[in-house]
Amino acid sequence: MSDKNLNDFFDEELKKQEEKVERQNNFNNQNEDPFGFGGYNEQKHEQMYRVVPEYNGQQKFVNKKSKGKKGFIVAIVALAMVVVYFLGYFSFMLMNPDIKFISDVLNLINEYAYVLDESDDKYAHNYAYQAANAMLTSIDQYSRLLTPEEFYELMYPQELTTAANGLGYSLNDNGEFYIAEVEVGSPAYNAGLFMGDVVLELDISGNGEGVADGKYIITDATKTEDFVKYIHSQKITFTIKRDNVVLPQTFTVEQTTYTGSAVEYYFGAGYTNMSQAYEQRLLSAGTLPNDVGYIRLTSFMDPYTMDGEQGLGDFTKAMNLFKQAGKKKLIFDITYNTGGRDDISSAVASFLVHDKNKTDGKGVVVSIDRDKDDNVVDKITTNSVYQNYFDVNAQQPQIVVLTNGRSASASELLTGALLDYQTAVQVGTKTYGKGIGQAVVQIKPAQANVGGKIVDSYWAAYMTYIKFYTPVSNKCMHGIGFEPQAQNVAENFDSQIDRAIEILSQKNA
């Protein structure tokens, strides 16, 4: 470590206590962790900080003007503190050989490394960042280090200000590129593309990556970096495969600005926000009884899904329309919903779960969080308003929850609560099996360049730290998933809707 870096180290150590106070003040006004699992509170926040090594020494010494003996004593004390810091640092290095090993490698690179790769990524040769990120990513596939820019964008999601098509993509088990997300209200949604559609061919124009206009065949041999370039186009015409059938029609999507949502609903004519294509798919799947409504939730991440536990978010609006339209039973679709925030999941649960032992509906447990030592660190609770929308005395379930192998994380947290309180029957296929949660832990203040604007931010760790358990049966389904009973297994959308209607019509429930 160079003299400059060593001085920086001690400056940072002296400031840490003040920074900790500042961090707490900055975030005390938030009611929950803005991202990941484990709702925010002061006690838990401090527990999370203890995951990261933090200096616990003296407050920073402020040397004011003094005369004579007092000034001499102050100087001696200050010198003694510096000596203590140096001794403490070298003792720490000796007592922690792993830290010394990392430090030695960093010194070696800084001193001798001949860098040939000139990258545009400003963090590419920030070796402390690379080392920290490597440690976090070695935990599991979810954990990683967040740059100040990434942290800021997660904490303060920006409204859509540039043109987009509303699509997200992923790879299926066969190595095929499929549509993993279609945002409600987006150009792709209005064009009639569905989640699960496999992309076979793209006819693109106005590409932002310098790719020539034209048709590109997509196979399991297509490189991901090439596919990403293709989809950054102003206009795309898709040829797709749906339910293993190649469709004869194509779907054209043009980028535009739009107001999206994660909530889609149908409660009859005049009570729906569905596009024509999505409404036609639902109604052709089966005739919904007069008392049955349909809601599909695509994510537990979007800020407009909920606004506070009982706020005026899109899901609350949908449930109020459900009641206004005279519906009594609900098909709740979370297929392809890969999760998001547990505070949104518990807020949605407030409408859909009912604990018979809590007549006032307050403090209903949705999930139990346990740490790596299996200690209970938190219980996620909600205030149930189920009785305002459903009959608490009904003998048959009034909700069917649709799931598939892409229903994960917060979707499974909610599914576990619905099944434990027996307010819903699961139809579809087995969920993904992600029963662990992540949290964002601030590490070091930093500035970020977000859209050309310099803002205060943090380096932060996005790290797995809890397992979540079902509220009544106390089961963790990580690596297992929730599986419907044999008679309720349904592979595709049409069969799922048909089976849901049967159950809600009290046939073979």
Image: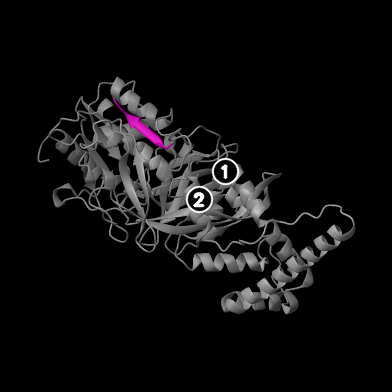
Would residue 409 be counted in the magenta stretch?
no
Residue beneath the point at 37% across and 30% down: 276
Dot 1 or dot 2: first in sequence order is 1
| Nearer-the-camera pick, 150 or 260 | 150
Q: Amino acid at mark 2?
A: His
Q: Is residue 419 left or right of residue 466?
A: left
Q: Residues within 10 Å of mark 2 (few under 14, many from 20)?
A: many
Q: Is residue 373 left or right of residue 59?
A: left
Instruction: Examine the rendering and report whether any part of residue 231 can be seen.
Output: yes
Q: Amino acid at mark 1?
A: Phe
Callout 1–callout 2 Cβ contact below 8 Å: yes
Looking at the rendering, which quadrant does residue 479 occupy?
A: bottom left
Residue beneath the point at 17% across and 47% down: 488
**In which quadrant will I find the N terminus?**
bottom right
From the image, tell me which residue sits under label 2: 45
| Nearer-the-camera pick, 357 or 403 | 357
Residue 119 percent location from the top left of the image: 68, 64
Residue beneath the point at 67% across and 51% down: 18
Q: Is residue 443 left or right of residue 71?
A: left
Residue beneath the point at 17% across and 36% down: 397
Residue 98 percent location from the top left of the image: 57, 76
Residue 115 percent location from the top left of the image: 71, 73
Disc 1 on helix, strand or loop? helix
Disc 2 on helix, strand or loop? helix
Task: Spot the residue most to the front.
Answer: 69
Could you tell me what secondary structure mostly forms the magenta stretch?
A: strand
| Nearer-the-camera pick, 327 or 348 | 348
Instruction: Examine the rendering and report whether any part of residue 335 can be seen.
Output: no
From the image, tell me which residue sits under label 1: 27
* Range of magenta residues: 262-267
Q: Is residue 302 left or right of residue 163?
A: left
